[in-house]
Amino acid sequence: MINKLFLSHPNSVNESYFEHMRFALGFSMWLSVAGLAALVHAFMPALCEKTASRILVKLYGKTQNRGR
C-alpha cells in the first residue's frame, strides 16, 4: 500500500519521491502565480495580458514526454 501511495507514480516518471515532490511543488507554485495573474487581468485587462498563458505554455512543455 505504501508503494502504491507514495512511490509508484514517481517511479513511473523516473523520479524519486523527493524529486517528484520538488517538481510538483514548483508546478503548483507556478499554477498559483498564473491564477493570480489571471485574477489581476480580470479586473485590470491592461495588466498581465499574457502572463498566465506564458506560464501555462512553459508548464505544459515541462510535462511533455515525462516518464517516457
Image: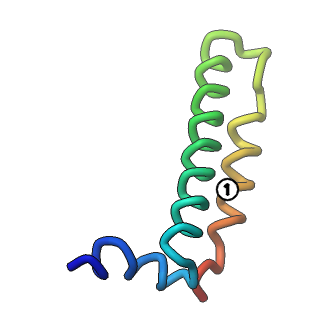
- x and y percent of residue 15 in the render? 57, 79
Residue lying at the far left of the rendered structure: 1
Which residue occupies 64% across, 36% down?
34
Above or below: residue 4 compared with residue 32: below
Which residue occupies 48% across, 72% down?
17
Res 44 → quadrant: top right
- x and y percent of residue 48 in the render? 76, 24
- Residue pointed to by mark 1: 59
- Residue 4 as seen in the image, left or right of residue 51: left
The residue nearer to you, when weighing 13 against 51, is 13
Q: Label 1: few (<14), some or many (≥20) within 10 Å? A: some
Kind of element beneath mark 1: helix
Give the quadrant of the N terminus: bottom left
Above or below: residue 6 compared with residue 45: below
Res 58 → quadrant: bottom right
Res 61 → quadrant: bottom right
Above or below: residue 27 compared with residue 67: above
Which residue occupies 71% across, 42% down?
53
Amino acid type, label 1: Leu
- x and y percent of residue 26 in the render? 62, 51
Residue lying at the far top of the rendered structure: 43
- Residue 20 as seen in the image, left or right of residue 45: left
Count of numbered circles on the image: 1
Give the quadrant of the C terminus: bottom right
